[in-house]
Image (cartoon, coloured by chain):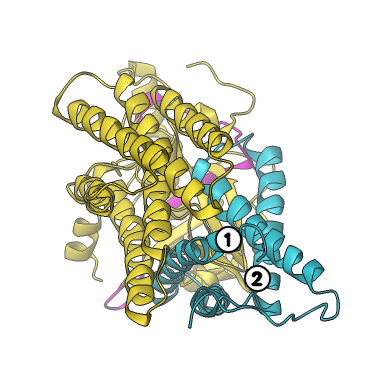
Chain colours: A yellow, B cyan
Amino acid sequence: MMQLERRGIDEYVISPMYTASDEHGLGLLLALMSLALSWYVLRQRSIGVRTSIGLLAATGAGHLGLALGHEPDARTGAFVAFGFWALYAARRWATTGTRMRGTVAGLVLSVLAYTGTLLSGEAPDQAGLIMKVLEIGALGLILGQGTETKTQRLRQSATVVSMTVVLGLAGWIGAFVGGGHTHELGETPGPGLALPRLEPTPPTAEERAAADRLFEETVANIARFDDVAVAAAEGYDVASMGRLGGHADNPAYTDDGRILDPTRPETLVYHPGPDGPVLLGAMYQTDESGEPGPMVGGSLTVWHGHDHVCFGLLPPGLGSLGSPLGTCPLGTVTVALTNEMIHVWTVDGAPSRFGDLDDEWLEENIGS
Amino acid sequence: MIRYRELVRPVLLIQTGILALSTLEATVVAVSGVGSPVPVLLTAAALVFVGSAARTGRLSRLLIWTERLIVTTFFVDTVISLFTAGAVLEPMVWLSRLIVPFFVLRVARAERKARPGTADEPEYVEVAA
C-alpha cells in the first residue's frame, strides 16, 4: 500500500459532525448571500427587524441549496417546502412590515424536526447545525421584539437557551450512534476518531503473515508487563493511567524514531480488574501528527488518529472533544489531529487483535 | 442607543446555551475520571458571566475578558491546527469562537466610546426591566 509522507486532516475520514460536505457548500453559500442581500436591501429598517428577516431568508435559501445537493426523496421535499416557506415569510415581513403568523411555530418545528433526525441516529454535519443555530437566532430576535415584560423575556431566554442545548445534545447522540467504532477502513467514524482516507482492500498472504508476526512479537515482548511494577520500573508512567483511560506511556519510547518496534511499544494499555490492573495490550504511535503509520498487515492493521481533542493545560489531560456547536471548554486548546496509533490486544480471548476492543467484552471478561 | 445593541441579548442567549453545553461536556469528561475539573470551573465561570450579561444587558468587565479569552484561544487553536493538520473550515467554530465574541466586544467598545467619562464600566441602559 502506498505510504504518504504526511497527512493533513482532509486525508482522514472524521465524524461528519466536524465537516461540511461538498454537496452542502451551495446551501451555505446561498444562506450567506441571502443574509448579506437582506441586510443591504433593508438598511432603512431597525437592526432587529433587518436581522430577523435576513436570518429567515438565509435559512430559507440555505435549505433550498441543501436540497439541490440531495437525492430527491421525502426529506429533500421537506427541505424545499421549508425553504420556500421561510423565503415567503421573510419577503412578506419585508414588504408589509408585519410578521406572518406562524413564523415562530415554523422555526421551532424546523429545529425540532432536525433534532428528531439526530436522535434517530443520524450524524449531524456543520451545514445542518449552523442552519439551526441561525433559526434559533431568528427565534430569539422575534421573541425579543417589543417584549418588555418579565414573562416575555423569560420565554425568550428559555426558548433560545434550551433549544441551543438540546440541539447540541442531539448532535452528540446522532454523531455517536451514527458513527462506527471498529477502526476499519471505509466506516464513518464517531466523534474524535480519524481514519486514513484509504480504500479497504482484502489483505494479501504477505500482509496476513506480517500481521501475525506483529501480534506474536508483541505478545512475547510485553508479557512481563502483566506486573504493573515491572512496567513502572522500565519507565512506563503507570501513575497517569487513570487520567488517560488506562494508557501508560513510556516517555523514552515516544519520539524515538522507532515506530512499530515490539521491543519498545510507546504505550501499554491496562484495564481495572478485580485483582488490580489487567494488561490488555500495547499501543504503537508515530512520532508526529499526520505521519502515516506502517500498515504492515494492510487493512488488518489500520492506524488511526484522534481529531478535535480539547486538551486541558492545567493539568495536562483530556478536557473534552470538540462540541457540535464549535467550542472546547475554556482552559483547553484544540488538538486538531494527534499522532497516528494502533492497538495490539494481547489479553487472552480478546475478540480482535488490532483496532478497537469491544467494551461489552471488556466488562464481561475483565471487569468494570 | 448603540448600534447593534438590539442584537446583543439574543446573541448572548445563544452563547449561554453553547457554554452550558460546553460545561456539561467538560463535566462528563471530568466525572468519568479522564479529565480535570479546571476546564469545568473555567467554562462554568464563563457561563455565569455570559448568562448574567444576557439577563441584565450589562456588558461587564468580566464578560469582556471572557470574550477576549475565547477569541484568543480561537486564534491559538487555528495556528496550531495550520501547523499540525492543515486548515480546518468549520462554520460553527467560526460562529461560536470568533464572530459571536467579536460582536460582543465590538458593542462593548462602542459603548465605552459613547460614554468617555466612564471608561471601563459605563452606566448601561437596561434592555428591559
Query: For the point 43% across and 43% down, which residue is it?
Result: A53
Q: Secondary structure at mark 2?
A: helix
Q: Secondary structure at mark 1?
A: strand
Q: Are marks 1 and 2 in contact (CB under 8 Å)?
A: no
* Mark 1 residue crowding within 10 angstroms, few (<14) / some (14–19) / many (20+): many
Q: Give x and y (percent) for residue B101.
A: 63, 59
Q: Which of the two discs, 1 and 2, sits closer to the camera?
A: 2
Which kind of residue does numbered mark 2 sit on? Answer: Thr
In-image side of A158 versus A4 (left or right): left
Above/below status of B44 relative to B107? below
> What chain does badge 1 belong to?
A
Query: For the point 19% across and 57% down, which residue is it?
Result: A361
Residue linked to disc 2:
B66
Residue A262 appears in view: no
Magenta part of the chain: A273-300
* Mark 2 residue crowding within 10 angstroms, few (<14) / some (14–19) / many (20+): many
Above/below status of A165 relative to A192? below
Q: Which mark is residue A311?
A: 1
Query: For the point 63% across and 28% down, which residue is it?
Result: A6
Query: For the point 50% across and 48% down, which residue is it?
Result: A51
